[in-house]
Image (cartoon, rainbow, N blue to C red):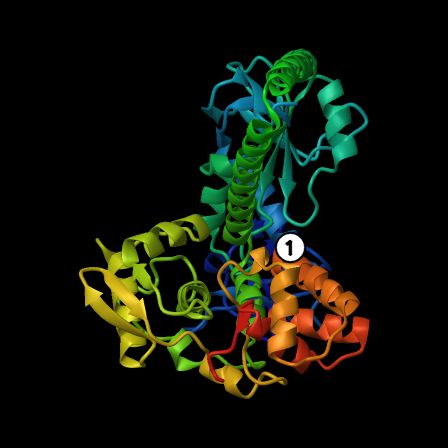
Amino acid sequence: MSSISALSRVPFGQKSGRMVTPVEVESGRACNCTCPGCNAPLIAKKGEQNIWHFAHDGLACAIGAETALHLMAKQILADERSVQLPAVEISLSATDALGKLQIVSAVLARAVNVKYEAVEIEVARDNRRPDAVGSGRGLSVEHRIEVFVSHAVDPLKASELEASDCACYEICLNDIPVQTTIAELRDAVTAAAHRIRWISYPGMATARRVLETKLQRLLGDAVQSKMEQDAHSAAVYASLDEEERLEKANRARQAREKKQSEQKLARANDSFKGTSTENKRAFLHAKLRLPAGTVPVILNTRVGGDRSFGVDRDVWQSDIFRKCILGGGHREIALENVLGWMQLRYVVSPEFPNAANIALWKYFSSLESSGFVRHIGRQRFLVLRDVAPWLDVANEIVGIWFWAPGAFFCKREELEEANIRGNFGLTSIALASILRRFHAEYLADGEPEDAAQSISQLIEISPMIVLNLLEEAGVVSNPRK
């Protein structure tokens, strides 16, 4: 839909002081409705192809649709007088000195389906005017209600409301499509507890202070425990001889690096899982170095169950190709491990039993047909070809270069030997610079070509010489050579 068409469409109109749907009025100009945003006349569009809606009878305004959603939501509150409310819960967290996440929480009220006796719209309370106020004999306090379509309650206002000890919640409708139906909007307003955010509640400020005190006590206990552990470790460390200390320190370093690596990977997977489909696609296109506007068939293969991962098939197939195929050399892949990895990065909701397993099997079968893998029994495949075809013309140096396994453990002596074998004629200072730079690129998850380019600028030699030297030392490899 064009932006002009989207602006001209208004889901609900205003007539005789009330919001109405296209169903309730005559077609065309006979509806006698106006735009709630600009008060201009509306036309009721009740065709057979599009969802029934209103359109401006002339130039469209920019706020009609959002204003219509906001006003209709308040009208639904006043008419229905019923809302499914979540529990009122406060939770505070912090990481203590031992690296453990400490969480303290308190529940001030249980989840409930409240039935208001009255809902007033836009009435003043404490020099403020909430969108609605619900009250009834069954409530200990009245509920102030805010409707979030385009503007949420800001932090300053939230702090002031909490300090006033009133009960206030916000109904979040910012992701509701403009062309929603009245039934969908009614459900979102009255029956979707996950859309409601409690902003303030009687006793919330006091409970927060109690939780803050409790959290600070836990953090202080952790500091004391850390000091005691450090003192104990220092005493034990002092009793060990030099060899034992070095061995223990090495094991501790490896364990620490492994844990940090696992935590970094978990954070990366969580971040990837939570971002939008378009952000996922942009990240993968950059990693795969896909030409702009191009998605090869091998990354967009129609297979059974391809909707099981909550994104378009080109996204999850690109991710699998990047992780399992590209640049890894000949190795075995178990589909059960691939599925476990996918569950960390996507919301896996199979459209039918075993759909996710079937989608993976079919996709790897298509990779086998294209010569990338070979089935070697059960749910296992062997990678035969780890280079992307579209990179044959994308690389400006020779092809696509990959870090060799164990590249980080390359020593300066190995570079010096490679320098002699390959007759490159590089000085010791140049070799030291190359060693430092490729270690830095390797740790930063950079590409060999990036390391070669930055080294060539640093010591003024050809990036091709750098790559050939690293290849001679067994640090990088180029499958196309």
> Residue 68 in the image: x percent, y percent?
62, 53
Against 194, residue 216 (above or below) is above
Residue at 38% over, 76% down: 385
Q: Picture quarter containing residue 129?
A: top right
Q: Picture quarter containing residue 384?
A: bottom left
Residue at 48% over, 83% down: 480
Extreme-bottom residue of the structure: 393
Can residue 386 be seen here? The reply is yes
Front residue of this view, candidates 291 and 88: 291
* Quadrant of the snapshot with the N terminus: bottom right
Against 111, residue 307 (above or below) is below
Q: Picture quarter containing residue 369?
A: bottom left
Q: Is residue 425 left or right of residue 100?
A: right
Front residue of this view, candidates 477 and 113: 477
Residue at 33% over, 65% down: 306
> Residue 395 in the image: x percent, y percent?
59, 83
Front residue of this view, candidates 110 and 380: 380
Amino acid on which disc 1 is placed: Glu
Can residue 34 be seen here? The reply is no
User: Mark 1 highlights which residue?
Assistant: 66
Label 1 crowd (10 A; few <14 / some 14-19 / many >=20): many
Q: Is residue 8 left or right of residue 288?
A: right
Q: Is residue 53 left or right of residue 65?
A: left
> Residue 182 in the image: x percent, y percent?
47, 51
Give SS at disc 1.
helix
